[in-house]
């Protein structure tokens, strides 16, 4: 008997081959889940450090905390506005998805719960990206590289870390929506689309563009038209009915588009009477740099699937036309309806290449994205220094003073506080921002935090803060109970 006969291994049976294939699938799935978990954990550690060191402020985390807390206590999406009055958040932004976070708050009542929900939600977007990559790139490895490309896109990490904006939750929801359209699962798509619409009033424009792409690309004209109609109807309903109903007037955010008319009606009029206003607003160096920064980490691969990439145009135009510079900052949450379609289009585009080149080029795009993440992605403490943030790195002594000041304020009592401490004191029904007092029974002031509430964004006014402190100190109705390192706490007499 020959040696070959002695050591011969039987050929794998069909069942054994299927087991090996399943193990391969399982391996790449584990890689994706591991990357999602590590990504989420790293960002949450940074978010927790930002929160504990008072770098996550009243604007915007505190706003969301107060709306969710009020919903949990029977006051649907209520918050304290810039004047100290109680309003329903739907008068500013139509983002009722916030109410769905109430069960999480009831289980873990902490502002960090909302920050974690946003981070984990963004991480979950890697799943539909993995499935799309697996299908269109033709292998489990291709799917894993697509998911890693999504997680390595640096602007995703920045916007996930920017706690908290309901619009950011549109990123994974739109990715799931693309997957379910690709799978021809209309009811699952409808659920994701409805949730995406609930993230903000302008999401309907993006959904309309997605419906048009789907109708043309998949030859489902009737279904695509229905999706587009639903998207347009949502945005019209939100702008013409919901916001005016809860605000008593038009959306305050029309002020961001004054250069091209402001309101939708005036913007349409400007398009006919002064089209140059649009070209001037869009062709600034800031906007051109914005487009480059969005495209570069993906190596422009989304241009290989221009139809799907074009679904990002409504949001891209909104950001470019805005008078607010941070709207065209890729680190801000305004990439919510851009990022999903650029990433998905990159996958669809790479799938159009010859099979023997797909994975090699996918790996190259992934390497470029990882390089961008290393160079431009968030790192501990960096978020506070970015122009999209409201607070700066605070000295250790002031952080200690702020913690002691927060500990003095009883739970639930009406309060007014500086912006940098606002997220820590927002879990109550009434929470104003200095120099507004409103119904406050306690006041916490960081005299070195110059932010005052204003529209469309808070502004720096150190003189106003100094005058406010002098007024409170001279008012017999208030008693100073804490004074350390520029942090003051006042209690209304009789409390």
Image: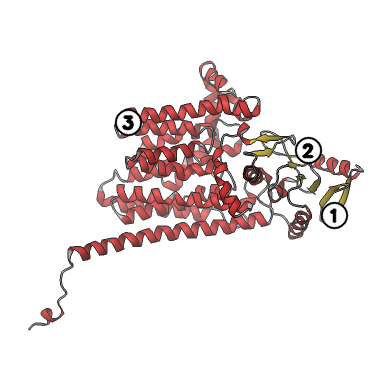
Q: Secondary structure at mark 2?
A: loop
Q: Are marks 2 and 1 in contact (CB under 8 Å)?
A: no
Q: Earlier in the sequence, mark 2 or mark 1?
A: 2
Frontmost of labels 3 and 2 is 2
Q: Earlier in the sequence, mark 3 or mark 2?
A: 3
Please name the residue that numbered disc 3 is placed on.
216
Q: How far from the left and from the top, in percent, is residue 245? A: 61, 26
> From the viewer's perspective, is the residue at label 2 or at label 1 nearer?
2
Q: Residue at the location (11% across, 79% down)?
A: 5
In the rendered image, the residue lying farthest to the left is: 1
Q: Nearer the viewer, residue 199 or 283?
A: 199
Q: At numbered mark 3, what does the secondary structure look like: helix, strand or loop?
A: helix
Q: Residue at x 28, y 45 (%)?
A: 353
Which residue occupies 58% across, 28% down? 242
For label 1, the SS is strand
Residue drawn at point x = 72 percent, y = 55 percent? 394
């Amino acid at each position: 008997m020959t040696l070959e006969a002695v050591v011969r291994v039987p050929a794998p049976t069909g069942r054994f081959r299927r087991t090996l294939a399943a193990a391969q699938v399982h391996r790449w799935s584990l890689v994706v889940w591991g990357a999602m978990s590590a990504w989420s954990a790293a960002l949450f550690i940074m978010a927790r450090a930002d929160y504990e060191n008072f770098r996550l402020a009243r604007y915007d985390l505190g706003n969301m905390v107060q709306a969710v807390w009020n919903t949990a206590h029977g006051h649907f999406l209520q918050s304290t506005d810039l004047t100290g009055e109680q309003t329903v958040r739907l008068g500013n932004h139509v983002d009722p998805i916030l109410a769905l976070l109430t069960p999480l708050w009831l289980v873990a009542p902490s502002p960090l719960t909302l920050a974690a929900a946003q981070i984990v939600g963004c991480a979950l977007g890697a799943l539909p990206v993995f499935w799309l990559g697996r299908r269109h790139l033709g292998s489990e490895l291709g799917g894993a590289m697509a998911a890693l490309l999504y997680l390595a896109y640096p602007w995703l990490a920045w916007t996930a870390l920017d706690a908290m904006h309901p619009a950011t939750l549109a990123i994974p929801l739109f990715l799931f929506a693309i997957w379910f359209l690709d799978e021809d699962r209309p009811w699952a798509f409808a659920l994701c689309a409805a949730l995406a619409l609930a993230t903000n009033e302008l999401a309907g424009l993006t959904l309309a563009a997605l419906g048009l792409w789907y109708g043309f690309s998949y030859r489902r004209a009737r279904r695509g038209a229905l999706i587009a109609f639903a998207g347009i109807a949502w945005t019209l309903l939100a702008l013409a009915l919901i916001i005016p109903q809860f605000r008593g007037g038009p959306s305050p955010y029309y002020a961001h588009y004054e250069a091209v008319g402001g309101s939708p009606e005036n913007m349409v009029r400007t398009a006919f009477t002064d089209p140059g206003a649009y070209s001037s607003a869009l062709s600034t160096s800031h906007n051109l740099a914005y487009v480059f920064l969005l495209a570069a980490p993906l190596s422009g691969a989304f241009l290989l699937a221009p139809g799907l990439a074009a679904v990002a145009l409504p949001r891209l135009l909104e950001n470019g036309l805005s008078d607010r510079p941070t709207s065209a900052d890729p680190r801000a949450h305004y990439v919510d309806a851009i990022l999903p379609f650029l990433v998905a289009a990159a996958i669809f585009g790479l799938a159009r290449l010859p099979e023997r080149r797909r994975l090699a080029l996918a790996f190259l795009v992934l390497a470029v994205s990882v390089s961008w993440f290393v160079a431009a992605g968030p790192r501990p403490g960096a978020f506070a220094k970015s122009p999209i943030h409201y607070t700066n790195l605070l000295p250790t002594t002031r952080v200690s003073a702020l913690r002691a000041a927060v500990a003095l304020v009883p739970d639930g009592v009406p309060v007014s506080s500086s912006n940098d401490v606002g997220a820590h004191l927002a879990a109550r029904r009434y929470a104003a921002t200095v120099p507004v007092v409103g119904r406050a029974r306690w006041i916490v002031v960081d005299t070195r935090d110059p932010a005052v509430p204003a529209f469309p964004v808070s502004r720096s006014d150190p003189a106003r803060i100094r005058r406010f402190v002098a007024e409170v100190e001279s008012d017999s109705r208030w008693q100073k109970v804490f004074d350390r390192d520029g942090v003051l706490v006042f209690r209304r007499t009789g409390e």
